[in-house]
Image (cartoon, helix red, strand yellow):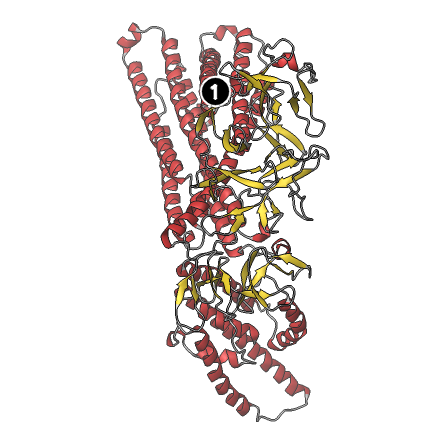
Amino acid sequence: MKLSPSRRPPTGRTVPETQNNGPVSFFNGIALRNHEIVMERVAVLSEEMAELVSVEAQRQGGWAILKQATGAQLLCPASGAALSRDDIIAPDGTVRACDAVHVDPYTGLIQPNSNAHMLLASGHSMPVPPDFFLHPQTGRVLPVAGNVGFDPASSTLVYTADACVGEVGKLETPLLPFIPFPPSRHAELPGPSKLRGLRAGQRLVLGGPMCDYDTGVLVPILAVTIHPQTGMVYPLGGVHMCPISRLRQPIQIGCPMMDPRTGSMALITGVGLDLHTGTVLPVGGLLLGESFIEPLSGRLVRVGGGSIRGGKVVPHAGGFQAFLDSQVLGARMRLVELLRACCEEWNAGTLEPHSEMSRQRAAASELEQAWKSSQHCMLQLLSRLEAQQEWAWGVAENGGSVGEVKLPGTELSLPALPGLEYPDPGGSGQSVPVLGAQLDWVSGRMVPLIGTMEDADGKGLVPIRLGARTVDPVTGVLAPVIGARLDVWKRAVVPVTVSQCLTIGDPPDIMLVEALQKECSARGRFWRQQRVKEEELVADLERTLRNCLYAAVQEESDRLEWTDTERQVKETATELEEAAYTEAQRRSAQNSDLSLVLPAHVLITLTGGDEEEWEQQSHRHTELTAILNRISVLMARYQWEQDQPTLEEEHPDEKTRQKELWEQLRQRHAELDVALSSLHWTRELGQLHADTAQLHFVSLFYAAMLSGSFWYRDYCLMQPRSGRSALKAAIMTQHKILPQLERLIQLLEDGKLLSPSASAQRQQSCELSTKQTFDRDTCSRAWTVSVPAAKGNNVLTALNTPISGVSIHSSSQWSTQSLKDHEKAVAVSEQNSSKKPFSSTSTQRGQDSGLAESQGDKKRHLYVTLIQRLASCGRIFSAAPALALLTSLLAS
């Protein structure tokens, strides 16, 4: 919707004083009044924002934004009076009250002296515990655990409580909770010894892998501590007894634990250190985000985690999420202060528009970045909890069964429960535990990971157990067992070591990753296209309103050109609504397909913002329609008043009426801006959902363990790897093979594949390296059906057999038998054709060469036909027949 140059208001013209009553002078007055209205509106909105920030700060417990703080007040050792921040810390950051506090040389924390006391909210005083610190920005004393975090990028401690004071920091990695090093009561030196550093190749990052001290099992890094005498930083993570599997499992956020105080089950929210042994303990039994009264200050805050004090779990209001939320509040308040200052400078006449706009844009960008960081952190935790809920539903549905274990010597089978021991199905006579399950892509069934292995000391077969010692196939030395997997080549369950997870690992499923990325890209493309159209619509609408108003004040004009514009705007609004409806239908169909191949929690994370987005789109369309109707009514009324000469005599001040009309139009335009801003916010949130879903899905594979992008990766090896459903297994197999078949068709049509003779030579040259590769004990191989390979043109004869005449259910037998039958038929044909005499002349050789090329083209055509039939078979039925024939084809 573009306006003709003749209808646009003139710009850039100098208006002489004799034209003060003309339309240009009127528009100068309109512009000045418009600026005044804008600044008045900004002043009102800034005050509303300040009130909203104040209410939100009280709800979240961000009291520092309100010039208040949490924690207790430090008392002066000499006078007993409460000390303020200025009494303790000088303007340059140095410590003034050296008789009350000191700076720890290793951590840099300001800690109260041993004889210091603090004043509680109740009015009572008590000695300051040794694990407290003084917040340098508020002057209050708080427990270190939960209120201080460690930044791995800069190796510095960061205050997570009352963090909205100061500017937003740019963190490269998430903060790790910092737990004070517990001193031993029975020795002069600090005694915990069950702490170790990271192995080569491991990174100090939240959720990164580390090895448990006792079992060697890979566990996530959930916190850090610093040795008070050496300054060494130790990552904290460990194992605990899982109440479901009754096996020692990694301590992970959201996993179930047994509360030692109550004996009931609780969810893990963090870790702590045992004061005597230094053992890493799970901490749980708290509801994150729940409100509670902070005992030191008596203020209402929200639970950010928990710590162990006096053998009990006490909540705290710190943590990384609280830190990010406080940063958002601080960025909002700084933007409010800039808006207030802008209004004051406008009233004083000292406003510099360009510099002020640059400051406003920088503050808005800072707020947007802080908000995205906060939402990203929250969505990662929610995605982790969704995965745990999916696992809990499976346990409630079938008791956590991961398949069936066949009893040796009988036809009986029992449900395979993780952690429970069964007679070895291999017939060793030993009791072996179930260590999870893995999907067999050939049969489409879950195979329980249960079996035996060679004893490290050469004493025969022993059960595969977590923590048992075995020879690491990567390093060749003894290493603890951290899990088990199905070796699809040996058709046996083998142990898994740390080196295998870190160096080999399971590669990401490229087909499924691409399917998820394709859906995320489609969503992002839709959002970008819609936003461009919406911004153009708003700009054209505003330009049209200005043009109509300019036409109204021209002396020679007595009609308003609004009808055509209204029709065009409504058509654009209808296009936007139809595009949104089409996108909703596309997402619904795509979600149905993705639900067959993606884990449920990944799909829930991806679609978490769809409902709110649809509501905002409907609100945008309703608001736009209503605004257009209101503008039409205003225009019609104004035109009707223009056509009534009696009304003109009653209202001689025409300019006042026109200004009122313009202000009403601007108000309606502002309402549309609000609706569009809400819609754009939901789309930004949807993009964060899509990014989190991709990170979570990729984190399901060992190859992404070291990336550190997803902080709550699942380290539990007891849960089934890949899907449980046989239908999902079949669908995922088809997703894997069909793109490969299509690529093979393209290569065959382009003639880029090697000839059979060259393929045979290449296969012979690669046999040794292939054997060496298969002899390595890796877990990244793909299972292929093993069938006898046809030779020469024998496999091509299978093209003459129609697909519909073959039993789909006996895929391997059908493939092998069909190839054998046609092999015999083609052998007879070859014998008959070989009776022709050979000639050594060049002419005969040329004819043979032409015949070979013709046969090569025919072979290529037959290959394409076969692959197309295989692809059709894989789309309609199970992909197993296609896999079997493709294996025979490639082997030939």
Q: Which amino acid is tagged 1?
A: Arg
Dot 1 corresponds to which residue?
A: 299
Give the x, y percent position of residue 209.
60, 47
Q: Is residue 326 above or below residue 50?
A: below
Residue 713 relative to residue 456: left or right: left
Label count reads: 1
Which quadrant of the structure image shows residue 507? bottom right
Give the x, y percent position of residue 674.
42, 26
Q: Nearer the viewer, residue 286 or 758?
A: 286
Q: Nearer the viewer, residue 741 or 558?
A: 741
Give the x, y percent position of residue 601.
44, 47
Q: Is residue 726 above or below residue 604?
A: below
- Residue 78 visible here: yes
Q: Is residue 555 above or below residue 678?
A: above
- Locate the C terminus by quadrant: bottom right
Q: Residues within 10 Å of mark 1 (few under 14, many from 20)?
A: some
Which quadrant of the structure image shows residue 354? top right
Residue 825 relative to residue 630: left or right: right
Q: Residue furthest front?
A: 186
- Locate the N terminus by quadrant: top left
Residue at 56 percent across and 8 percent down: it is: 349
Residue at 52 percent across and 72 percent down: it is: 887
Q: Nearer the viewer, residue 766 or 154?
A: 154
Q: Secondary structure at mark 1?
A: loop
Give the x, y percent position of residue 413.
40, 66
Q: Is residue 789 above or below residue 443?
A: below
- Residue 688 visible here: no
